[in-house]
Image: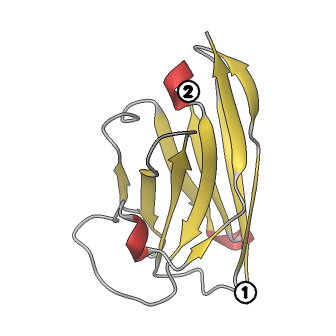
Amino acid sequence: QVQLVESGGGSVQAGGSLKLSCAASGYTYSSNYMGWFRQAPGKEREGVAAIYTGGGSTNYADSVKGRFTISQDSAKNTLYLQMNSLKPEDTAMYYCVARRDGGTWFRPPLEAWVYNDWGQGTQVTVSS
C-alpha cells in the first residue's frame, strides 16, 4: 500500500522560507511522476510542482517559478519542496502526490487527475 507522509509545514513571515518533505513508502519510486499540490480555503486545488523521478525533469506553476524548487532523494524515497520568498498567497494546505500507473508526458504534469496517491497534507501559513 502506497503511503505518502508530508512534513515541514508551518508559519512564516512573508519573504521567509520553508522546506517540505514527503516520505514515500510501498511505492516504486523510480521512473515515475511525483509532485506537490496546494489548496487554500475557498480556492481550487493547484498543481505547484512536479518531477519525473526517473530523470529529474521538473515542471512548475507560473505562480511559483523562480521561488520554489522540487527535488528528490531516491535513496531515501523522499520528495522535497524548497519554498523561498514566500508570499501570503502561498498560504494553503500542501499535498504530496504520486502516480503509480506509468504513462509518459512531455513535462511532468500538474493536473490532479494524473496522480493516484495523495498524502494527508501539511499546512503552510505565510503572514504579511
Relative to 88, say whether 76 is above or below: below
96 sits left or right of 75 in the view: left
Q: How is the image coloured?
A: secondary structure
Q: Amino acid at mark 1?
A: Gly
Name of the residue lying farthest toward the front: 42
Which residue does the image show at 71% across and 41% down from the upper left?
Answer: 123
Which residue does the image show at 67% across and 39% down from the upper left?
Answer: 19
Image location of residue 67, percent across then percent down:
45, 30
Image location of residue 18, percent across then percent down:
68, 32
11 sits left or right of 100 in the view: right
Image location of residue 65, percent across then percent down:
36, 35
Mark 2 lies on a secondary structure that is loop
Are circles 2 and 1 on residues that touch, CB within 8 Å? Answer: no
> Dot 2 surroundings within 10 Å: few (below 14), some, or many (20 or more)?
some
Q: Quadrant of residue 22?
A: bottom right
Label of residue 81 in the image: none
Which residue does the image show at 76% across and 43% down from the upper left?
Answer: 8
Decide which of tag 2 and tag 1 comes sooner along the chain: 1
Q: Is residue 127 visible?
A: yes
Q: Amino acid at mark 2?
A: Asn
Label of residue 84 in the image: 2
Q: Which of the two residues, 105 or 45, is positioned nearer the viewer here?
A: 45
Name of the residue lying farthest toward the left: 106
* Circle 1 residue: 26
Mark 1 lies on a secondary structure that is loop
* Cα distance in 3D space between marks 2 and 1: 30 Å
Which residue does the image show at 21% across and 70% down from the upper left?
Answer: 106
